[in-house]
């Protein structure tokens, strides 16, 4: 059992995403990942779906950090899929990424779900308590070493689907 979902939210710089942030989020994500992101397996979990939640960091009205959470199931387990997460290049290594993840984990702790799944770099996300989800199977080709889970129920297993 992990209790890491219960860690407190970052207070200061993180705000809930609003519809007015959509263009800023899109521009930030395109700059961070490039147009190829739409081919990624992670995108299949998001297309045609609406985010359960989104968080942003704004600087003088501009979006400089963003993360979204999407409703999914892993096998029969209700969960949230985290991504994309991006911080503007000039604002990195100042803890904004960690604050965005903390906001997601606080949201997840209050939601009726069992945990958070993502496809990302373990060297970055393991600091928050994410661990390899060897038996979670996202749609399409994916590097299995990048499928990570943090939740109340462990281990999690089965096909990953949009909820
Ligand atoms: C990943 C990202 C969101 C982190 O944002 P951030 O605000 O710089 O994060 P933090 O300030 O909380 O943490 C920075 C630390 O994480 C490290 N880090 C960043 N990306 C990393 C990665 N992919 N793997 C390992 N470490 C990473 C940095 O080197 C830095 O280390 P330091 O504290 O020793 O200097 C940002 O680098 C980004 O937008 N990258 C491009 C998009 C991306 O790759 N998204 C994640 C998909 S896996």
Image (cartoon, rainbow, N blue to C red):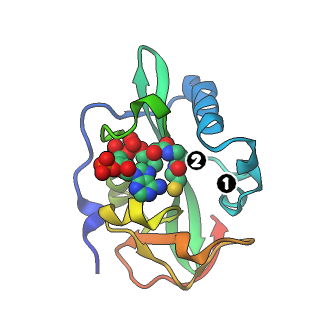
Q: Earlier in the sequence, mark 2 or mark 1?
A: 1
User: Which part of the image, by quadrant, shows the N terminus?
Assistant: bottom left
Tell me, yes or no, if residue 103 can be seen here. Answer: no
Query: Outermost residue toward the top?
Result: 60
Q: Quadrant of the C terminus?
A: bottom right
Q: Is residue 8 left or right of residue 102?
A: left
Q: Residue at x 75, y 71 (%)?
A: 140
- Determine the secondary structure under disc 2: loop
Residue 19 relative to residue 128: left or right: right
* Image location (x, y in percent) of residue 151: 38, 71
What residue is drawn where x is 70% and y is 63%? 41
Out of 137 and 33, give the one closest to the viewer.
Answer: 33
Which mark, residue 51? 2
User: Is 134 or 150 nearer to us in this picture?
Assistant: 134
Side (left or right) of 44 relative to 103: right
Q: Residues within 10 Å of mark 2 (few under 14, many from 20)?
A: some
- Name the foreground residue: 52 vs 81: 81
Rendered location of residue 129, percent (x, y): 32, 68
Q: Are marks 2 and 1 in contact (CB under 8 Å)?
A: yes
Residue 92: image location, x then y, percent: 40, 37
Q: Callout 1: 10 Å neighbours few (<14), some, many (20+)?
A: many
Camera sees residue 131: yes
**Which residue is at 59% across, 40% downward?**
32
At 49% from the left and 26% from the top, the residue drawn is 63
Is residue 112 placed above or below 21 in the rendered structure? below
Q: Which mark is residue 75?
A: none
Q: Which is closer to the viewer, label 2 or label 1?
A: 1
Q: Secondary structure at mark 1?
A: helix
Count of numbered circles in the view: 2
Residue 46 — which label? 1
């Amino acid at each position: 059992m992990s209790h890491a979902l219960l860690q407190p939210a970052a207070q200061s710089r993180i705000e809930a995403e609003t519809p007015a942030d959509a263009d800023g989020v899109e521009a930030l994500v395109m700059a961070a990942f490039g147009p190829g992101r739409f081919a990624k397996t992670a995108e299949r979990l998001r297309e045609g779906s609406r985010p359960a939640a989104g968080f942003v960091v704004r600087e003088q009205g501009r979006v400089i950090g963003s993360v979204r959470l999407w409703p999914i199931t892993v096998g029969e387990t209700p969960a949230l899929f985290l991504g994309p997460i991006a911080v503007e290049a000039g604002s990195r290594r100042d803890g904004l990424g960690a604050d965005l993840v903390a906001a997601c984990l606080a949201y997840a702790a209050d939601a009726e779900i069992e945990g958070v799944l993502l496809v990302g770099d373990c060297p970055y996300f393991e600091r928050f308590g994410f661990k390899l989800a060897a038996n979670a199977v996202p749609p399409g080709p994916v590097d299995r070493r990048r499928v990570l889970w943090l939740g109340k129920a462990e281990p999690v297993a089965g096909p990953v689907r949009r909820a």
